[in-house]
């Protein structure tokens, strides 16, 4: 257990000083503010009905920016853009070590491969908690700002709903981060892992879903994709699906909440298991 | 005989059809500097990788500090630099060592001590990516020294260093050896191994050709004689030493005879009417031995 603690502390130190981490996290927070608050605010100020508002009336636009909407807002960005960034982070964190040679240097320090993997994952878990907390915090600040400037009563959402969305955020980001770690480990380098990972999340999954609209047997397959599970969990927690006006890309209603939760947990275990097996068996070259 | 810190028996590694390491059996004793000598591509690094648990052997067995290779109990007491230093480019040298000290579970206070040891303390605050090749190499050695390991494994530590850096690295290994540190150290440079090592193993094409002390490897001292005329000298030499124990080198002749036979050689040459110009003991350099060994190997 001390080995895991040592490895976690080591990995936290190097992650904390890694510019790529802060760029990814900063981008995540910035995208959230821009897409949820800045664009909606501009559409709202423009009187709604324009292209930016996706045809939604101003009152609905405003309602989405108020504190009471935080639980939906928090989950709507998770499945696609948020997930893609976390996938990139995971792939960089795991893949770069192969090109830098740090995988080898760490393997020579003694704790054992699975112990150091546990340390890496624990440190990345801290990062995931930090990112979701930062998103929640910016949602709180931004929505308060909107409510105050637009003279709206501040109505807070139920704490249970916030907690549920927060938990969903941890799970979805955890799955995508681990997915990134897996492909970074598989590819033994960051470039191919990041490239193929992004194509998968942003292109392949969406194409498959598009084809499945025309050819229903494909539904069975698309229902099994990690993006479907993440999108469905967000949909089940109140985020507007992409199919509705003003909906968020990536948010789906294909699976029920509990099914999505089970699928995501299964992916978490699968990604973890395959990564651990690869690290344990493979030669460090 | 002191305890064996590293042993291997019939260690073999194949990559597909290619035999990278072929049946290597060796022993490193506590307190000695063990040289691993061979040209690039001889299989030295792959052997060291197997001993450190980075690479799984195809067959054969090994123990390091009494444990199987890669066992945390052994790895945590072994400091190693294998095939170039691998560090986080965006971190300073000092922060890189802090990270590795944490992984190793040793006090971060040791970081400055290790930097001092390789003369990098003043540059510890610079980013790794800004280091010269020599500084990177020294940081790798500093990392291997963290936690005062029982066994130090250095794979070509002088690679990429300029002559001064090479000298410093040799001095460092020399001072570590003087403190009783066990060092397993690979090189393709003969003079390095000759100066530093108690025992050497010579590898070529994946095979360990010989394992012995430097003195044994050089063999008995021979005699070098230079006299005129050359044909008379050669005839006398052959008569005394035997036809196949004489070799023409430079402008003289080498005889496989002990130093105690020198007066006899001098008398015989004078009696044969030769003008004796030079007669002295001649030690074989490791280089001679190395090329003898690998030359045979190539010719096979």
Image (cartoon, rainbow, N blue to C red):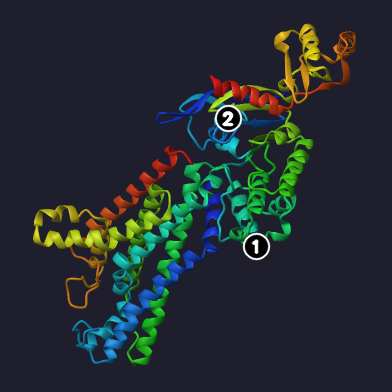
Q: Is residue A255 visible?
A: no
Q: Nearer the viewer, mark 2 or mark 1?
A: 1
> Picture coordinates of residue A218 (x, y %)?
13, 54
Query: How many tags in the picture?
Result: 2
> Picture coordinates of residue B152 (x, y %)?
66, 38
Picture residue at 33% right of the left edge, 92% below the top: A150
Describe the element under mark 1 as helix, strand or loop. Answer: loop
CA distance separating discs 2 and 1: 38 Å
Q: Is residue B227 left or right of residue A64?
A: right
Q: Residues within 10 Å of mark 2 (few under 14, many from 20)?
A: some
Q: Which residue is mark 1?
A: B126
Q: Residues within 10 Å of mark 1 (few under 14, many from 20)?
A: some
> Does mark 1 fall on the same chain as mark 2?
yes
> Picture coordinates of residue A263 (x, y %)?
26, 53
Q: Is residue B102 left or right of residue B231?
A: left
> Picture coordinates of residue B88 (x, y %)?
55, 56
Mark 2 or mark 1, which has the lower sequence index?
2
Q: Quadrant of residue A169?
A: bottom left
Dot 1 falls on which chain?
Answer: B
Q: Which residue is mark 2?
A: B67
Q: Is residue B284 visible?
A: yes
Q: Is residue B198 left or right of residue B299?
A: right
């Amino acid at each position: 257990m001390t080995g895991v603690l040592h490895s976690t502390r080591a990995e936290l130190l190097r992650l904390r000083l890694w510019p790529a981490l802060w760029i990814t996290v900063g981008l995540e927070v910035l995208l959230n503010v821009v897409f949820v608050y800045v664009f909606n605010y501009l559409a709202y100020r423009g009187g709604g009905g324009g292209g930016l508002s996706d045809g939604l009336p101003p009152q609905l636009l405003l309602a989405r920016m108020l504190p009471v909407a935080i639980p939906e807002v928090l989950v709507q960005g998770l499945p696609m853009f948020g997930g893609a960034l976390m996938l990139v982070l995971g792939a960089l964190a795991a893949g770069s070590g192969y090109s830098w040679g740090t995988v080898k240097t760490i393997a020579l320090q003694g704790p054992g491969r699975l112990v150091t993997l546990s340390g890496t994952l624990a440190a990345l878990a801290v990062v995931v908690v930090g990112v979701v907390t930062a998103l929640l915090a910016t949602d709180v600040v931004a929505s308060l700002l909107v409510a105050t400037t637009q003279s709206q009563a501040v109505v807070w959402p139920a704490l249970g709903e916030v907690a549920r969305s927060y938990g969903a955020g941890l799970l979805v980001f955890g799955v995508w981060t681990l997915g990134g770690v897996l492909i970074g480990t598989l590819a033994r380098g960051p470039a191919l892992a990041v490239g193929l990972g992004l194509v998968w999340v942003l292109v392949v999954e969406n194409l498959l879903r598009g084809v499945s609209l025309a050819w229903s047997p494909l539904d069975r397959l698309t229902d099994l994709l990690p993006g479907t599970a993440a999108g469905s969990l967000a949909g089940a927690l109140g985020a507007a699906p992409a199919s509705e006006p003003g909906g968020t890309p990536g948010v789906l209603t294909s699976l029920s909440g509990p099914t999505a939760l089970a699928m995501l947990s299964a992916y978490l275990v699968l990604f973890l298991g395959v990564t651990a097996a690869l690290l344990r068996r493979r030669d460090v070259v | 005989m002191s305890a064996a810190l590293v042993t291997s028996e019939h260690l073999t590694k194949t990559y597909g059809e290619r035999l990278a390491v072929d049946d290597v059996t060796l022993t490193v004793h506590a307190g000695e500097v063990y040289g691993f000598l061979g040209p690039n591509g001889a299989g030295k690094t792959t052997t060291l990788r197997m001993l450190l648990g980075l690479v799984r052997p195809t067959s054969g067995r090994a123990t390091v500090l009494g444990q199987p290779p890669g066992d945390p109990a052994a790895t945590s007491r072994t400091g190693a630099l294998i095939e170039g230093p691998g560090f986080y480019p965006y971190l300073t040298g000092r922060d890189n060592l802090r990270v590795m000290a944490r992984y190793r579970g040793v006090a971060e206070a040791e970081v400055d001590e290790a930097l001092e040891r390789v003369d990098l303390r003043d540059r510890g605050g610079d980013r790794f990516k800004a280091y010269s090749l020599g500084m990177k190499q020294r940081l790798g050695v500093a990392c291997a020294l963290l936690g005062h390991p029982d066994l130090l494994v250095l794979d070509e530590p002088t690679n990429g260093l300029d002559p001064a850096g090479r000298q410093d690295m040799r001095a460092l290994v020399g001072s570590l050896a003087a403190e009783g540190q066990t060092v397993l150290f690979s090189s393709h440079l003969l003079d390095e191994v000759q100066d530093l090592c108690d025992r050497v193993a010579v590898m070529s094409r994946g095979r360990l050709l010989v394992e012995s002390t430097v003195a044994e490897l050089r063999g008995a001292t021979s005699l070098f004689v230079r006299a005129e005329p050359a044909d008379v000298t050669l005839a006398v030499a052959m008569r005394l030493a035997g036809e196949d124990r004489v070799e023409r080198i430079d402008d003289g002749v080498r005889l496989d005879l002990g130093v105690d036979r020198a007066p006899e050689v001098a008398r015989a040459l004078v009696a044969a009417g030769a003008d004796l110009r030079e007669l002295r003991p001649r030690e074989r350099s490791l280089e001679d031995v190395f090329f003898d060994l690998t030359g045979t190997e190539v010719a096979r």
